[in-house]
Amino acid sequence: GIAVTGIDLTPAMLERLKKKYSDRDVTLIEADYMACELGTERYDAAVSFQTLHHFTHEEKLGLYEKLWRALKAGGCYIECDYMAEQEDYFVAEKKRLEEELKLVKGEYYHFDMPCTMDNQKRLLRQAGFTEVEVVWRQENTTILYANR
């Protein structure tokens, strides 16, 4: 009895979801969720599963602010992702590779750059979420629950 909106850059992933859930109320959008307009107070919940460990703090903060605006009052955001004990190495390595390989700014490259749990929680609070808690963690995979 729920309506779901899925956003992905990959047409093949969207097609798999369409086939798997053809009997459900699912709206699929082929887009970059960092740039896609999500609206205001439109959703009860938002979920992200292991995709945000590729982005900088600034990029995540922009997305979190957009998600906060898109959620209805009392809505929640659930994020499952890799969170590191130490992130400085990943940030420095990404910068080194960008310079060495002369990577184009604004293009997406697959590079893991997980935040620490503390930084991830801080970014969510900075975006406006009131309560942010770790609800599950195994090794470096963590699930956070944040309330609007």
Image (tube, rainbow, N blue to C red):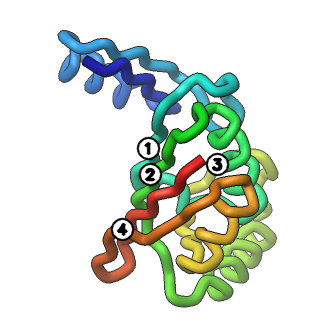
Considering the numbered disc 1 on the image, is that residue within a helix, a strand or a loop? strand
List the residue tagged with mark 3.
108
Q: CA distance from mark 1 to mark 2?
A: 5 Å
- Between circles 1 and 4, the one closer to the viewer is 4
Where is residue 138? Give x, y as percent.
Answer: 28, 78
List the residue tagged with mark 4.
135
Q: Is residue 22 left or right of residue 2?
A: left
List the residue tagged with mark 2.
78
List the residue tagged with mark 1.
47
Q: Which mark is first along the chain, 1 or 3? A: 1
- Are circles 3 and 1 on residues that touch, CB within 8 Å? no
Q: Amino acid at mark 4?
A: Val
Q: Quadrant of residue 88?
A: bottom right
Q: Which mark is first along the chain, 4 or 2? A: 2
Q: Amino acid at mark 3?
A: Tyr
Q: CA distance from mark 2 to mark 3?
A: 23 Å
Residue positioned 39% across, 64% down in the render: 143
Considering the numbered disc 4 on the image, is that residue within a helix, a strand or a loop? strand
Q: Amino acid at mark 2?
A: Ile
Residue positioned 35% across, 16% down in the render: 26
In this view of the protein, which residue sits in the foreground, 115 or 44? 44
- Are circles 1 and 2 on residues that touch, CB within 8 Å? yes
Q: Which mark is first along the chain, 2 or 1? A: 1
